[in-house]
Amino acid sequence: MTTSKVLPALPLLAPALVAGTLATPAAAATVSVTIPRINVAEYHRPYVVGWLEPVAGGAARTVFVWYDVKKAGREPGTKWLADLRTWWRKGGRSMQLPADGLSGATRAPGTYQIPLPANLAPGQYVLKVEAARETGGRELVSLPLTVPVKKGGSAAGTTELGAITIR
């Protein structure tokens, strides 16, 4: 008969599970970003970035950045990140890209779920999502956020971005 090395530890973990010490972090929330389908003759997937700004002031924290990560050569994909003007000025220009866990390829129209960082300090923030598209427009959507997240919120763009929701 073999003995399990996991089961003997279970009685030790039970009080912690009941007390909630192993529960998910207070900031365990998800941002839902919708990229709408735009009917135009020449469609290019948008570059999209999301970041948090503390209401009380302080450094902005990038949550995700979607751009053409595979484009290289004379005009790498990072060249066009400056078109995300607000984020670029708030700290995007000083980021080392690709950023592990934050950078990703551009997305087709649809709705995407992005987890908020689990180590956010409690407080008031503004979530900002910005999109820019070649031969298209640029749009910025802002949404207030309180950590720990007890009540979500939503906002919507008008052209380049659809619904932005925090849950």
Image (cartoon, rainbow, N blue to C red):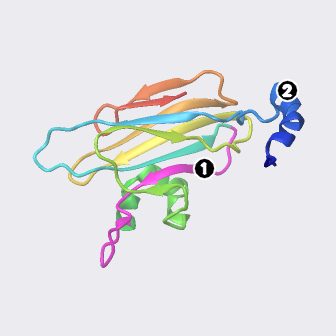
Q: Which residue is mark 2?
A: 19
Q: Which residue is mark 1?
A: 60
Q: Nearer the viewer, residue 148 or 11?
A: 11
Q: Main secondary structure of the magenta part?
A: loop
- Mark found first going from the N terminus, 2 or 1: 2
Q: Amino acid at mark 1?
A: Ala
Q: How many marks?
A: 2
- Left or right of 74 in this view: 81: right
Q: Position of residue 112 (x, y in %)?
A: 41, 39
- Left or right of 156 in this view: 121: right
Q: Determine if the magenta segment contains residue 65.
A: yes
In the figure, residue 33 lies in which quadrant? top left
Q: Nearer the viewer, residue 124 or 35?
A: 35
Over which residues does the magenta segment extend? 56-77
In the figure, residue 73 lies in which quadrant? bottom left
Q: Secondary structure at mark 2?
A: helix
Q: Determine if the magenta segment contains residue 63.
A: yes
Tell me the number on the disc at residue 107. Answer: none
Q: Secondary structure at mark 1?
A: loop
- Left or right of 77 in this view: 14: right
Q: Position of residue 91 (x, y in %)?
A: 55, 57
Q: Is residue 2 above or below residue 15?
A: below
- Left or right of 3 in this view: 167: left
Q: Amino acid at mark 2?
A: Ala
